[in-house]
Amino acid sequence: MGDPTGEADRGALRLDFDRRLLLQFRGSAITSDAGLLTYRELDDTLRLASSSWSHSFLTEKNWQLWPDVPADRALYDALETGDYAEWHAYKTNQIEEINMPTLNDLIDGDAQRLDTGFTFTEGPLYHPDGFYYFVDVRESKFYRIKPGEKAELLRENTGEGNGTTFDPQGRLIQCEGGNRRVTRWPADGTFASSDVLMDRFDGKRLSRPNDVVCKSDGSVYFTNPGLRIPLGERELDPSAVYRIMPDGSNKHVADFEYPNGLAFSPDERVLYVANTRHAAYIHRIELDSAGNMVRRSIFADMSSDEKIGVPDGMKVDVQGNVYCTGPGGTWVYAADGTHIGTIKTPEVPANLAFGGPDMKTLFFTAHTSVYSMRVKVAGLPGHPFKKG
């Protein structure tokens, strides 16, 4: 039966507005020393409100539709009086009262070491046939490991091969930092030959492609940090994220200081990018339906006194929680940017991947070793490949 009073529709509109307002509030990540809203935060709030539905909802006469909604009332009062402290305090309290998951709600046991004796492991990737790929970046080696077995060396001289993913056809995509290119390898697993997907942008040589993800439409996004390239050899500046289209063309997505790991939200409308060096942030890049950047914000600040680890590899689970390896362990965030907790493993990981038949195993590449850990929420693979 329908809702003749329209109350359900109004409630849904108000809930949607408040949820997005809360996300914007957290995403702005900038407040003054006094803890009040900055002009940027207020401007973002007003723009969000006016684009959601008519700005007239902010007028006094419309508050009768929501007589018991203190959050919206507080926002109206702030806009009327210019005093944002009360609204800021209300939203902060509201954030703290949200029933966020804990690490115990997400992880299911301790990390188990699968193999060791490597120099610096990276590039984890689960194959639907039941095994994981990973690399030893410093040794330019490419491995496969099956549960319960030792790692098997598949390739050498990878050109400091790093991040990996699959395209929709199951072909391996790899960032080759030392070779300054992104390559594609056949789906049959023989690694007999490869194609160069991209080694230049606008005629200028790439710096050190680092990590890569593939969108469901087949487009490939990768990070290209440049700070480790000597200035005289650096052709592309600043560092950036680039996109390789299914037709082979390429596009610039966004500039960064030192972009590293990256991952899509479940609906692929947000691209998270970890910045590794001085500004230890996770950036949140909003995309339109064509995959182009609409706007960007700071999703999380991973600054820490921990001595080991930087914001690096990243994955997302089906609930939208973000897992990013970083200082001291793997930092886990809710979709609104709340830090749920940090997963501790015997060695601090540089990257991770979800895997297993149920996608409820985390596979960590952690310096000299690789580890696995069972989790309670299934993860996203970071690519569209599904074996038929």
Image: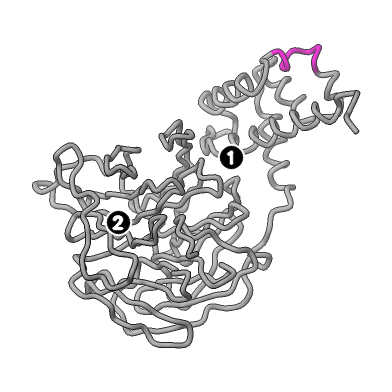
Which residue is denoted by mark 2 in the rendering?
Answer: 210
User: In the figure, residue 368 lies in which quadrant?
Assistant: bottom left
Q: Earlier in the sequence, mark 1 or mark 2?
A: 1
Residue drawn at x 32%, y 76% as measured from the top left: 143
Indicate whether residue 25 is drawn in magenta: no
The CA span between labels 1 and 2 is 29 Å
**Quadrant where the image shows the N terminus:** top right
Q: Is residue 24 left or right of residue 127?
A: right
Q: Which mark is residue 7?
A: none
Per the rendered image, the range of residues in magenta is: 56-62
Between 122 and 131, which is closer to the camera in this rendering?
A: 131
Identity of the amino acid at label 1? Arg
Identity of the amino acid at label 2? Asn
Residue 167: where, in percent of width, then height? 38, 56
Which residue is denoted by mark 1 in the rendering?
Answer: 26
| Residue neighbourhood size for the residue with mark 2, other residues' Cα within 10 Å, grouped as few (<14), some (14–19), many (≥20) | many
User: In the figure, residue 255 lies in which quadrant?
Assistant: top left
Between 280 and 191, which is closer to the camera in this rendering?
A: 191
Image marks 1 and 2: residues in contact by CB distance under 8 Å: no
Above or below for 153 versus 264: below
